[in-house]
Image (cartoon, rainbow, N blue to C red):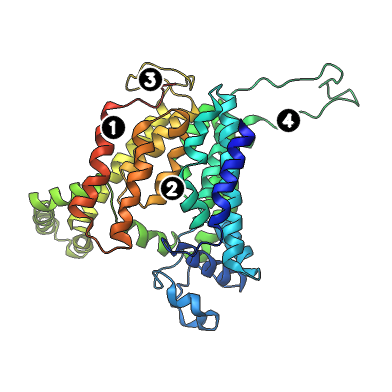
Amino acid sequence: MSRAILAGAFLLRLPLLPLPLTLSDDALRYLWDGKVAAAGFNPYALPPAAKNLTFLRDEAWRRLPHREVQTVYPPLSIAAFSIAARLPNPILAWKAMAAAADLAGCALLLALARRLQLPPARTVWYAWNPLVAIELSGMAHVDGLGVAACLATVLYLLPAVPAVPPARSRDPRDPGAAPAPPPAWAAAGVFAATGVLAKLAPITALPMWSRQSGRPGRMLAVAGGLLAAAGLPVLAAAGGIPPGLVTYAVSWEFDGPLFEPLWRLLDWAGAAPWLARLLDAAKRLTGEYARWNPLYHFLYPQFLAKALLGLAMLGVVIISASRRDGRDGGGTGRRLMPMGPAAATGWLLGALLLLSATVYPWYVVWVLPWAALYRHTAWRVLSALILLSYLSQRGGVPLMPWVFAAIWVPFGILLAAGRRWSSG
């Protein structure tokens, strides 16, 4: 059955390779960032509109989104983009690379189902899901690389009993001994770092994954060492946090299921003017006008909502790292029940997505492998409903209220009434 599932996944994605980038132009930005890096320039410091990059401009540059914003992609992604940018047909080359990562994710999900002793047929909900195929192979989003790395991480975190052939000893003093495999926590640390270096989202799972590994300090040392080796040069070149990431965190917002109603509620309640009055009082009390004045720039409902949701995200990360270990195949549905790494990863990524200010259709893909394994109806239905957001992104239809409601109200009902992540 596994071969049939992979064959179906391949056949579903093959006709998407020549598909034009109609739903998203992110791949054009990927290739521009790769082109800049391949030319020896720093995409973390120089946006596409920079004058000293004028000689690199071509027809694709005119279609680039957000030309005034520096790149937000981690070093591994930039390296992959630069490889594709050097090839004769960069777009097709990158789409082939993205499709390969997508198919690798399907294969890893099948391996994960076998490790969990779950029916391989459940992976069809991911491998043959139109949203996954369109976004990761058709539109060539880099998220496929990060998803595959997350699946590999969890695969190494799950216990397995290796089959040791009796004819060969594992005694290192025996010249015919079979080589011992690397510790699972070390391999998990490598793949966890790979996921973060492809896209930053998996960094939120590092505390939970390290606890699940049984060797938290060692796994964090492996993952942290790799992240430091790749990330510190970026921070040094950008003079701190890359400005593109700051712009994304402060300015980007679209279809966040909690963000959209929350900022409107804060606006209606007059939260920003109330906080402004508090700042006025603090200035009068301390006489430090210069110290307090910059804070006024952040007193608007959207930023306040992001700050509150950011605190909630921190709480989710802490909860995920605090859960007791448990088997992934069963549970009672209680709030802080034990969760194994697969169920805990699905719960964490799903909760963070719901707290995000920006939810593009391809962001949902991060939750779908785990939803497929645990037959989580709400998230599988969302993989179809989220496509309605393209009516606003590409069709010019206002997001609020009807498109937003059509996506999130059915999902919310199913989420409240449906199964939990620990259900087998």
Residue located 48% across and 24% down the image: 340
Say if residue 191 shows up in the picture: no
Residue that mark 1 sits on: 414
Against 197, residue 416 (above or below) is above
SS at mark 2 in the image: helix
SS at mark 4 in the image: loop
Q: Identify the image quadrant of residue 393.
A: bottom left
Mark before the other along the chain sequence, 4 or 1: 4
Residue located 28% across and 38% down the image: 411
Packing grade of label 2 (10 A; few <14, some 14-19, many >=20) is many
CB atoms of marks 3 and 2 within 8 Å:
no
Mark before the other along the chain sequence, 3 or 2: 2
How far is mark 4 from mark 3, CA to CA? 32 Å
CB atoms of marks 1 and 2 within 8 Å:
no
Residue type beneath disc 3: Met
How far is mark 3 from mark 1, CA to CA? 21 Å
Residue that mark 2 sits on: 131
168 vs 129, left or right, is: right
For residue 99, which numbered disc appears in the image?
A: none
Residue that mark 4 sits on: 181
* Closer to us: 367 or 150: 367
Give the number of the mark in front: 3 or 1.
1
CB atoms of marks 4 and 3 within 8 Å:
no
Residue type beneath disc 1: Leu
Residue type beneath disc 2: Leu
